[in-house]
Image (cartoon, grey):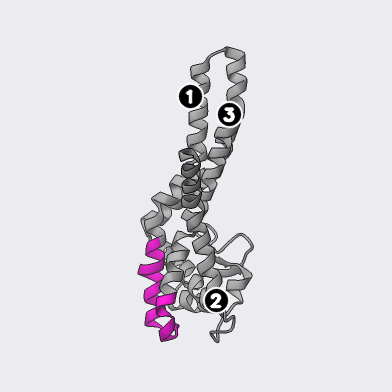
Amino acid sequence: MHFLILIVLLLVLIFAPSMWVRRVLSKYSQPADRYPGTGGELARLLLDNHAMQHVKVESTTAGDHYDPSDKCVRLTPDKLDGRSLTAITVAAHEVGHALQDHTGYQPLRMRTQLVKLANPAQKLGAGILFAAPVIVLMTKAVPIGILMVLGGLLTLGFATIIHFVTLPMEWDASFSRALPMLKSGDYLHAADLPHAKRLLLAAAMTYVAASLVSLLNIGRWWAILRR
């Protein structure tokens, strides 16, 4: 019974942030025509106001993000062409990342380098976990197998660690960059400011929420290896 309660609590801790982020983003996506301009138009205006005409604004299906390599703010179609509070606020958050890059904000550069390592590291971790049982069978060296399993699990958790370490960077993009831009330009209806702050918090937590869910991969591998 205690084990079942523990599992339920862990699942709540893993899924609750992600569910909260999705709920907040969805809630303020209506009304869809709350603002006269789109998220993409606001992103372009904010970039131009900060002398970042070289930064592009494009549509994407891979989630809202700023790509420092291509110098591009990418927004999903509902944000790029949307006129909701969510569209406006998320666009400002991603411009906040572009502004970080423009001003040489070191944590963004650090995260960019770490993210480049994350995907190869996850593939390496999966490969190690696949190889561990084979190595044990071939060598009969159980301690080596245990070390390989632990190393593989730690490697799979690399992306999660990255997002937790760089949470202050997301907070900076939301509350030190995007919020002042939205306030100073009077881009928001006065009544929307408290709601925009919730959206900016959700935007800052997006990667952390997703990385918590990715922890289930580690649990899945652990369950497979224990069979």
Within 10 angstroms of label 3, few (less than 14), some, or many (20 or more) residues?
few
Of labels 1 and 3, earlier in sequence is 1
Q: CA distance from mark 1 to mark 3?
A: 13 Å
Within 10 angstroms of label 2, few (less than 14), some, or many (20 or more) residues?
many
Q: Quadrant for residue 198, please give it.
A: bottom left
Tell me the residue that label 2 is attached to. 39
The answer to which of 176 and 3 lies nearer the viewer is 3
Question: Over which residues does the magenta segment extend?
Answer: 171-195
Tell me the mark number nearer the camera, choosing from 1 and 3: 3
Residue type marked 1: Leu
Tell me the residue that label 1 is attached to. 147
Q: Is residue 68 above or below residue 41?
A: above
In the rendered image, residue 180 lying in the magenta stretch gets the answer yes
In the rendered image, residue 184 lying in the magenta stretch gets the answer yes
Tell me the residue that label 3 is attached to. 225
The answer to which of 41 and 153 lies nearer the viewer is 153
